[in-house]
Each structure stands twice: as C-alpha cells, then as structure tokens.
Amino acid sequence: MARYLLDTNVLILHLRERRDITAMLEKWIRIHRLFISVVTRTEILAGMRPHEEKRTMELLESLDNIPIDGAIADRAGRLIYQYARKGVVLSLADALIAATALEHDLTLVTTNPKHFPMPELALYPVE
C-alpha cells in the first residue's frame, strides 16, 4: 500500500470536478493511505466557495490530517534557508508540505512539481 500526501492543488481539482483527478482519488482511497498536511486543509478552507462547504468538509475528514510539529517546522525552516542560498524562493506553505512528506516518508502528489525542487522528496506529478 502506497502512502500519498495530497497537495492543495490536487484537492482543488477534485472539488472543481475534474474527472481524471476524481477518478484517481476514488480509486486510490480504496487501496492506498491518503494524507494531507494541515496547511493544505487551511488553504482549502480559505478558498472554499460557500456552496462547497459540506462536500469540502467531507473530503477533508476522509483524509488523514497531519499536524505541524517541531520536526516538520524545523525541516521546513531548513529547506527555506537552504534553497534561499541557491536563489530559490520556497513559500512557507510549500516548505511545510514538503517537510511533512519528508518527515513521514510520503510521496507528494502535486500538479506543481517545480514548487518542490528537493531531490530527496518523492513526487507523483499529475497534470
């Protein structure tokens, strides 16, 4: 069983009813363990449309939510620092999501692999 951390953009595509993403998630939820960072939860709720609340909350509750702890916060800070020295700016949200995947040995599913330049991070890019 694979263990995936879903990036915010993947959930947005599902909520906007992109059929290929919805089909992938419906299949995966039966055979894999699916996680989100609480950062993703925050981003989803911040951008939620009023008529989407019930469906959005059902989706968020169906996934394993991983909180930010000291190890994730430290790793995210180090990632931001490390990449800034290379001239690469990581957003705080992306750094926290990447650190969550790294700390929990999860594959990050994202439509934005360029936001996650860490070679040690397992990525599953979707279009």
Image (cartoon, grey):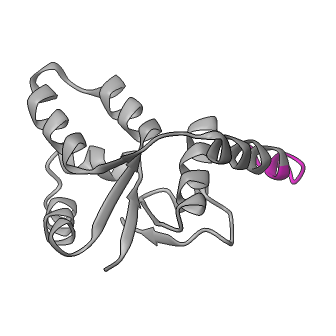
Outermost residue toward the right? 85
Q: Position of residue 10 (x, y in %)?
A: 33, 53
Choose between 97 and 47: the one closer to the eye: 97
Instruction: Name the residue located 48 percent from the left edge and 66 percent from the top edge.
Output: 106
Measured as percent of width and height from the top left, residue 88 is found at 77, 49
Relative placement, left or right, of 86 versus 33 is right
53 relative position to 41: left or right: left
Q: Range of the magenta residues?
A: 82-89
Q: Residue furthest bottom?
A: 1
Q: Residue at x 40, y 30 (%)?
A: 42
Look at the image and say whether residue 87 sits in the magenta stretch: yes
Q: Point out the image quarter for the C terminus.
A: bottom left
Q: Is residue 73 left or right of residue 34?
A: right
Image location (x, y in percent) of residue 100: 55, 52
From the viewer's side, name the closer residue of 108 and 68. 68
- Check the picture and name the quadrant holding the N terminus: bottom left
Count how many numbered circles sit on residues in the image.
0
* 30 in magenta: no
Residue 73 at x, y = what percent?
A: 66, 40
- Reply above or below: 108 against 43: below
User: In the rendered view, would you say 42 is above or below 99?
Assistant: above
Name the chief secondary structure element in magenta. loop
Which residue corresponds to the image point at 79% horizontal and 48% vertical from the top-left? 78
